[in-house]
Amino acid sequence: MNEVHRGTTELPLVVGVDGSEPSLRAVDWAADEAALRQVPLRLVHASLWQRYEGAALAEDLGKPSELVPANGIVDGAARRARTRRPDLKVSTEVLAEEPEYALVRDGRHASALVLGSRGRGGIAELLLGSVSLSVAAYATCPVIVLRGRHDKQAQPVTHGRILLGVGEEAHGSAAVRFAFEEAERRGAVLEAVRAWRCPAHETTDHPLLAGEPAHLHEQRAAETLEAALNDVAAEHPSVEVRRRTAEGPARKVLLDASATADLMVVGARRQKQTFGLQLGRVAHTVLHHSDCPVAVVPQRS
């Protein structure tokens, strides 16, 4: 491992790099984020990735892309991070294993993991690479995937808004705390959203009862929102919080709101001894289609 700086006890922010354009944009974003958090930046390359897509990095090094070795990839990424944030503490490591395993393991000793989405142009941009999806599903620390058009920098903020999706069991959740901390670091507004739906069998055409079932569901959504936020809000008095309930599927509500957010935060409940991807439908959908970066924050059951 090539240690650029030593002596810190802070958990680093870890970035997966492979020389591709998305991973280099993730380095830019993560350098800003690490500076905001005042933690070191750790750049990890797993050498068993199927292929390098390092045209941008190769051009920077003045070499054909097929000749750029793994060490060149992380060294180039480190130079990029230092140029962007000269005071940042940076370390690099090349690992001879599959990236999913390497990054999930590194996440046990990280403040967060940052990954680029692997899409190219057109329809491909809607799809998330298998590495990013797997890491988001299994990591024990927050995973930030650089989705959408707003993935070049964490600062300055574009919209001044952090979007939080509030689920059924959000009271005291790690996702709520993470969202407040991110909003506080950036001086951004925190918009907390709770979606609700009225089941079809509860509707009625009676003129005296019309709208009552919907009102009850909306009221419950507002109560859930308050319960999830109140305790944590008291710990972050400087954060402006905008509470909003919205009728419709949570996935659609959050995706619609992502176009004007700098970061979306959603929770992912981790079950012990459970096989398969540990992502709910909401987290899975926003990771594939969000217009802004997405932070998936795990919560142990």
Image: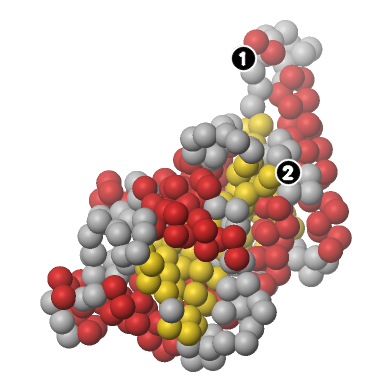
Closest to the observer, 209 or 118? 118
Labels 1 and 2: the sequence-earlier one: 2
Callout 2: helix, strand or loop? Answer: loop
> Few, some or many C-alpha atoms within 10 Å of disc 2 (few <14, some 14-19, many ≥20)?
many
CA gap, disc 1 to disc 2? 26 Å
Residue 146, how many percent across, how many down? 44, 60
Residue at 71%, 61% (x, y): give it.
180
Closest to the observer, 173 or 252? 173
Three-letter code, disc 1: Ala
Residue at the outermost top position: 206
In this rendering, does residue 81 appear at all? no
Closest to the observer, 23 or 104? 104
Q: Which residue is mark 1?
A: 200
In this rendering, does residue 20 appear at all? yes
> Few, some or many C-alpha atoms within 10 Å of disc 1 (few <14, some 14-19, many ≥20)?
few
| Mark seen at residue 143 | none
Rendered image coloring scheme: secondary structure
Residue 160, how many percent across, how many down? 60, 67
| Mark seen at residue 170 | 2
Residue 31, how many percent across, how many down? 49, 77
Residue at 79%, 70% (x, y): give it.
238
